[in-house]
Image (cartoon, grey):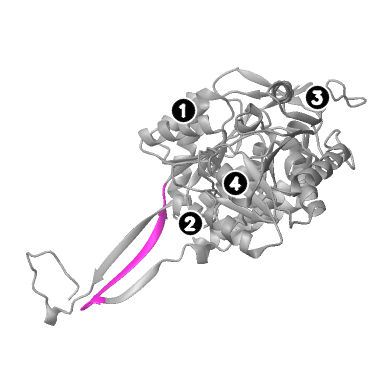
Amino acid sequence: MKTIQHWIDGSPTQGSTSDTQPVFNPATGAEQAQVVLGGTADVDTAVAAAAKAFETWSESSLSQRTQVMFNFRQLLVEHEEELGRIISAEHGKTVDDARGEITRGREVVEYVCGLGDVLKGSFSDQVSRGIDVHNFRQPLGVVAGITPFNFPAMVPLWMHPVAIATGNTFILKPSERDPSAANFVADLYKKAGLPDGVFNVVHGGKDAVDAILTHPGIEAVSFVGSTPIAKYVHEQATSHGKRVQALGGAKNHAVVLPDADLEFAANHITAGAYGSAGERCMAVSVAVAVGDAADALAEILERKAREVKVGPGDKPGVEMGPLVTKAAQERVENAVGTAATQGATVVVDGRGLKIDGHEEGFFTGPSLLDHVTAEMDAYKEELFGPVLVIVRADSLDEAIDLINGNPYGNGTALFTASGEAARRFQRNIKVGMIGINVPVPVPMSYYSFGGWKDSLIGDNPIHGPEGIRFYTRPKVVTTRWPQQSQQVAAGFNFPTSS
């Protein structure tokens, strides 16, 4: 049985405890490894290594940091298939889907390869007689990321390349459900020429998280996960003087107007709802069918849900794999049953699905629920599984009010042929990321990722320009170089730019 260890100061380490937790293959239900569970002592060790590395890494040139990122980017390309299979084996998503998340993570590495441009300061000449002003940004120190199981490569890649490129050192606490991707990436960093101690991995559960949130040697924490934990992370870390990025849950709506191409919309909504078994914070979980679109859209969505190919993630042709754990499978299937008792129409029932040769796997099929209302649990709760609910609305304004009344505001989409409707939607909707005929509107790396309301606790989105600002702090320098023969008299009044 393989044991997955921490990665601290450039090499694997068992850590301070003998506590472990099983890592399962979701497609078979079998235990495939044990991961060590760290705590305060392991976080202390990682912080000490990172703090020591910061002394030299923070003083490295932009060219040196950029070269490491170029090397790292190339290694991600070369090892994409291998890393994708590691993710698939522990998470359950298809290998192709895993490769897609690696690609989207790699885009952030490509963004910071332009470090010389994104870190440029500004200069103002002669703001007062003989006085100039310029500014620049410097790294914070040791920073940390706490990341979810659903994107074991992509979400960390939204954090650590930005932090490291800007001169910080990083401690990653990945999900204990699928931990191997983090160690694989750590090894790629080492091969790319990153000095030991700059990137570290501490595995574990709540003990490791709490140690990170309260450690005086950690300057900032980035988190992606559920809203209750995001609120906890934000409260704990800020109370200990840290900067915090805390991204929470979601309930993403896709609105379909009668003028939309319904076949096109249903194709993309189906993929957005059932891709990665719905275990995405940007998954489409609610289809809002407006007016005359409702019956026809429901019919097409039913057909397409029944066509989704479910099976092991490493099998060719499979479109949707299992859920990550047995508990997740049971939770999702219970939610479908609850929806039926509350009055929803179960159009497609994915419960009880068995895959030949993988009968013990954590599989559930796509489920489609119609005539769902805002009062039902299936609408209110983030199910995080392959369940798509249809809510019917009489108008676009009613659909907008429905979405704006939801506590989450991560992502949303509108399918329409009307530019006027699209403009009205994107201006009036209270959601951070919007797609127009795009079901999963994840921004490119040179924009920042983050929702509104309960989907983002605090005001710090992730990656892109906001990421650069989060992992650095500004300095502004006001300069005078007087000539000896032109001494300026000092004044007791507050200085002005005269």
The residue furthest bottom is: 485
Q: Which residue appears at 65% of the width and 37% of the height?
A: 183
For the residues labelled 1 and 2, the Cα–Cα distance comes to 29 Å
The residue furthest right is: 356
Q: Nearer the viewer, mark 4 or mark 3?
A: 4
- Magenta stretch? 127-140
Q: Secondary structure at mark 3?
A: loop
Residue identified by numbered label 3: 351
Nearest the eye: 458 or 89: 458
Q: Nearer the viewer, mark 3 or mark 1?
A: 3
Instruction: Please name the amino acid that badge 2 sits on.
Output: Ser
Q: Point out the image quarter for the N terminus.
A: top right
Q: Which residue appears at 71% of the width and 61% of the height?
A: 417
Percent of width and height locating residue 358: 88, 25
Instruction: Please name the amino acid that badge 4 sits on.
Output: Glu
* Secondary structure mostly taken by the magenta-highlighted segment of the chain: strand
Residue identified by numbered label 1: 211
Q: Nearer the viewer, mark 1 or mark 2?
A: 1
Which badge, 3 or 1, is on the more N-terminal residue? 1
Q: Which residue appears at 81% of the width and 28% of the height?
A: 349
Residue identified by numbered label 2: 60
Crowd band around label 3 with a 10 angstrom C-alpha radius: few (<14), some (14–19), many (20+): some
Nearest the eye: 441 or 58: 441
Do the residues under discs 3 and 2 have CB atoms within 8 angstroms?
Answer: no
Magenta stretch: includes residue 331? no
- Residue 312 is marked as none
Q: Nearer the viewer, mark 3 or mark 2?
A: 3
Percent of width and height locating residue 489: 8, 73
